[in-house]
Amino acid sequence: IIRIGGRSQATELEGKNLRVVSKYISKTRVQSQTLGQTYSELEETMKIAGFSIKPLHQSRNGATWKGMQHLLCLKWPMIHAQLDLMDAEGLNWLGVKSINCSKSEDMDETDHERLKNLTRTAEHNIHHLSKLERRILATSWFKQWCEDKSASLFEAVKSAKGLRENIQAVHEEINRRALVQADVVGVTTISLTRNIETLRRIGAKVIIYEEAAEVIEAHIISSLMPGVEHFIQIGDHR
């Protein structure tokens, strides 16, 4: 007998929970390698997510030279070289301290050709820009920085989701190997719906519902898995 779900108060079922039994099911070599590699990749992915979310959180108080300089160095090295000489005072000079990701000006109305011209001027000599032109250009940089960090964060979250699904698939296969050794599998209707994919793969022939009068029809229908030959309901006929 193996029980799926929370801890049972019945002493007869002590040690019969799937979480306990599955610990004694040996993993295959491929499964061990998959889990080790996937957990390692998940850890690195969460680090990437942390590297993205921390500066985004800090950016609510405005742009910082530490956060912006990598973007400028990568995309506009000639401008970066000029601002780098100013160190932390560079952004103060640009006038972006009051800009943040959540309240940044909508740049859609700014003519893209004008931005290109401002960028070319700044690459030649950033001191030729007026205060308003510096702010327009700096705002576009900061918006690009926020978009890049957000994209990196969402990509990391998406990747982490896929890695967790891979880990879950390995554990579900281990659970399946434990369940096929049992003559009886005990499960609540809620646990059945949560573990339906694993239960479908064990090929149960008989399903018995206790207290069937209290079970809603949707849960009964979900338990009608392929291969079931006998469906028995026990409960108050009223």
Image (spheres, rainbow, N blue to C red):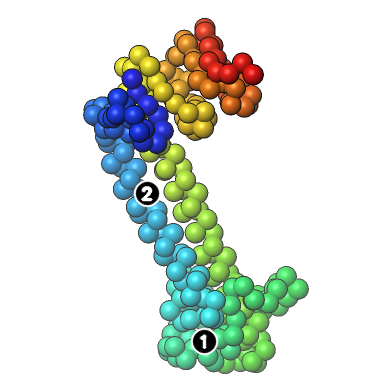
Residue 84 occupies quadrant? bottom left
User: For the residue marked with disc 1, what is the amino acid?
Assistant: Leu
Q: Nearer the viewer, mark 2 or mark 1?
A: 2
Image position of 194 (left or right of 221) = left
Residue 151, percent from left and from top: 54, 59
* Residue at the image position 46 percent from the left and 54 percent from the top: 156
Picture disc at residue 55:
none
Q: Please give the label number shown on residue 91.
A: 1
Mark 2 and mark 1: Cα distance apart in space: 36 Å
- Could you say whether the residue bearing mark 2 is in a helix, strand or loop? helix
Residue 42: which disc? 2
Q: Is residue 230 left or right of residue 29?
A: right
**Front-most of residues 112 and 206:** 206
**Residue at the spot x=54%, y=76% of the render?**
60
Q: Is residue 194 left or right of residue 238?
A: left
Give me the residue at 44% from left, 39% from top. Answer: 165
Q: Is 197 situated above or below 42?
A: above
The residue carrying pointer 2 sits among few (fewer than 14), some (14 to 19) or many (20 or more) residues within 10 Å by Cα, namely: many
Q: Quadrant of residue 62?
A: bottom right
| Disc 1, SS | helix
Assign the C terminus to one quadrant of the image. top right
